[in-house]
Image: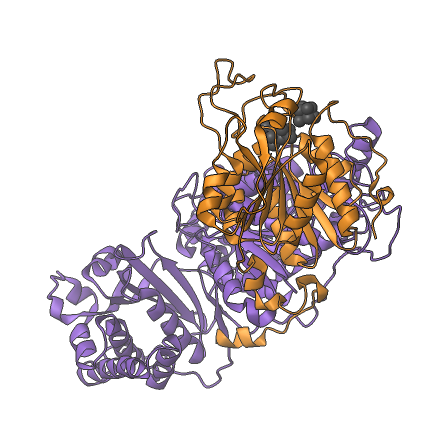
Amino acid sequence: MDQSISYSLKIGGQAGQGVKSAGLVFSKIAVRSGYNIFNYVEYPSLIKGGHNVIQTIFSEDVVNSPVQSVNFLIALDLATIKIHQPELVNQAGIVYEEEANYDLGDLSTKTRLFPIPLKKIAKESGAPEIASNYVAMGATVSLLGAEFALLKDLIAEDLAGKDISLIEANQKAAETGFNYAEEKFAFGFEHILQKRDVVSPKMVINGNEAIAFAAISAGLQFASIYPMSPVSNVMHVLAANQRKYGYIFKQAEDEISAINMSIGASFAGARSMTSTSGGGFCLMTEGYGLAGMTETPLVIIEGMRAGPATGMPTWSEQGDLRFILHSHQGEFPRIVLAAGDPKEAFYLTQEAFNLADKYQTPVVVITDKNICDSEQSYEDFDYSNYRIDRGQTTTVIDSEYKRYQITQSGVSPRSFPGFGNHFIGNSDEHTEFGYDTETISDRNAQMEKRLKKLDLCAKEDMAAPEIFGPADADITLVSWGSTKGGVLEALKRHPNVNYVHVKWLSPFPVGPLKEILERAKYLIAVEASSTSQLAGLIREKTGVDILDKLLKNDGRPFFPEEISDRITSVLTSK
Amino acid sequence: MTTLQDLATPITPNFCPGCGNFGIWAAFKNAAVKAGWDNHNTVFTAGIGCHGHMVNFVKLTSFEGLHGRAIPVASGMKFANHALNVFVFTGDGDCLGEGGNHFIHACRRNHNITILLHNNSIYGLTTGQTSPATYKGQKTKSTPDGNPDEPFLVSHLAVAAGATFVARGFTGDIAGLTDLMIAANNHQGLSVVEILQPCVTFNKECSPSFYMENTYKLPEDYDPENKALALAKAIEWGPKQIPLGIIYRQNRPVAESEFPQIAENTLISKEASVRDISELFTKQH
Ligand SMILES: Cc1ncc(C[n+]2csc(CCOP(=O)(O)OP(=O)(O)O)c2C)c(N)n1
Ligand code: SF4
């Protein structure tokens, strides 16, 4: 297998047919065979029925995004074949239910068909009908030349905790599917999933899991969250692990309560966070500014989905950037970071906790559905260098303690209730002690104190944008967030193109970014937004107007193919 | 030991002369002295309204947050450090209008906190609009033709929503109010003290004399552990028919006790430290 070649396998069916778990199992087979993967899921906001699909792209090389083309399709229903037929490459493989007698038209000449009595095999193995997905998986493992033992183990892991007879029935179903394909379709497809000589253990992890893991590793003590797609999984991971690791997770009655509870816990000394999507963040904007005004550290995860209003709950958009940068009345320091993939989400979330404590202000980490729900394969994240910084605190008892003391840096040492000092956390404008005030001098002093914390953050912590590809390129793509994935894949096809990835949105890396952009020969902004919010921000901050834009706002990720097409058309028209 | 001197701040209360809030201020300070509440064991939150100004007048560590949100902030504090006495000063507008959702859910969950609800049946700070506790038909600045809506009966709502200690006091009876505040804090669970607090400036109907004439103390033999009786008592409201005292009391596990991670020590007693999560990573392999 050529190192750079990647293959894409799609599993489709109705919600409730076990599409997602089959996909996860498949991606782990690939990883345990020595390949890198990217999992991309599409599902409607439904639990049963509706079309669900998971795509696994695997390669010897790192895979950064989904692609439009499909090499191998597992169709658990007819709709899957109908919907995804246009994506199939020539001679793609299709595993599907034989008994259904689908009319597949001319597909038998364009593709390689592998009809299998999925339901019958599941039934004869003593497994429920849903085990059809494992029958199909067994056949696929045979066709792609992978080891059956990997699938057998993964079924046991997937069904861990279930009745042993059920697990064995599922394994038997898978094995029968495997044997059926071995006999009927031996070498019917290229063995592209043969186990490689060297296999290093890797995680299959999505953005939500990475964020929850980061919080746990970074010493999280309290989280309050209200469920919302596509970030609910952050709360599921936190909920499941709280007793083991000793922090508290509490589901609140709404997002307003979630953020206020987290603020209360933080005020009392706990390392705290909350997490939501755009709609929930609307309700949180009030608490967002409260954290800023009262100088209470808080980490907020905002996983964007397609808006406005309820929008498309299980689809993506990069439409909340300006909202997060400007929401809440008045002016307060806010630190806003954006992750481009699960790995960045992990490290940025860890960092966010330190920044929140150091600057005593809210820190937002932005992701989006394409990061939240998409797994990638990574070696275990190395955080051996991570140190907890709780910022300036004091336990000295001082009858003249000033919670909002005017200091050079703008940061004043925090004390906690119960330690003996008197102070007031106050959402009203306040004196250094925290008492209400409306005098000109207090107001000016406190406003200046709060806002200058951001200057310090820019100086001491802000990172410059990252550049991928050659320093000197014919075309420079500019973006942020999950768009990074599609862009990096496109870059594999265009050695003369580079990419500027913006992770710090507030404070904003004006100087370094301006320099990069002014040096570039031709700029294209790539954004999942109809109004190109990042390009607007860049123009506002640096004066550089990016004229060429590749925008979409249909809920889908940027596929490398569409970015590559744009690059090609610019290069040919030049 | 706490003295009245310890509780004094440099700020003089700016409530209108004759305001019931003076009574709450006095009762709370008396209770703090009697029960020994100080900056080692006590914290409070306040909503936005005249009541919220209390943060300026009592020298105990506090957090004045947003209109309606004092309860969730207090719940978070209690989770972080359940060794603290946690009080909430809130108003009928703050707690039942903007914060109604938090109020009923906090009652249901039974956080071990004490809510002191300044019920003046009006929006004081915003100069006299109707509140969720304003009587039907009452003329206010926002209902010049009479309030078209039925009011909440605070104590009734609290019992129904699941609060495990519900009492009603009156600012004209500072000694009685002091005792209710101490009993409420001693109770393990969510306590609501509904305090009848005349707003002499904007609510002429609920005047001090009105409450003097129409309140009575629940008799010694009243059984607050009987929920059906408590609901009936809490709904009682009329001439000479407003009961004061402990209306309802029930033993039920508190919200914080549902978390074994803080069974031994408070959440913040252990400093935040980097955790080894290699086990979580391995599960993803
Ligand atoms: C979000 C928001 N909406 C409205 C207000 C204006 N506001 C301040 S206090 C208040 C009502 C206060 O009534 P209550 O809670 O009964 O307190 P009181 O002043 O009577 O003590 C209102 C509406 C505000 N501060 N914040
Ligand atoms: S407006 Fe009413 S509640 Fe507010 S201080 Fe004056 S009398 Fe008291």
Name the residue nearer the viewer: B276 or A424.
A424
The answer to whether A208 appears left or right of B88 in the picture is left
Residue A1 figure quarter = bottom left
Q: Does A181 sit left or right of A568 as displayed?
A: left
Please tell me which residue is depicted at 51% across the width and 19% down the height of the picture: B138
Please provide percent x and percent y for residue A98.
14, 71
Q: Does residue A210 sit above or below A330 in this rendering?
A: below
Seen at 41% across and 75% down, the residue is A28
Q: Quadrant of ligand 1?
A: top right
Q: Which chain is purple?
A: A
Q: Position of residue A530 (x, y in %)?
A: 45, 38
Residue A502 appears anywhere in the view: no
Q: Count numbered badges in the picture.
A: 0
Q: Position of residue B229 (x, y in %)?
A: 46, 45
Q: Is residue A514 left or right of residue B160?
A: right
Corner quadrant of residue A395: bottom right
Which residue reaches farthest top? B145
In the depicted view, which residue is nearer to us: A339 or B263?
A: B263
Please tell me the colour of chain B: orange
| Residue in the picture at 45% in, 25% down | B149
Q: Position of residue A184 (x, y in %)?
A: 17, 82
B106 over B237 or under it: above or below: below
Instruction: Pick the residue in front: A55 or A307.
Output: A307
Q: Which residue occupies 66% across, 21% down?
A: B200
Q: Is residue A347 above or below residue B44?
A: below
Q: Quadrant of residue A271?
A: bottom right
Q: Does residue A94 appear in this view? A: yes
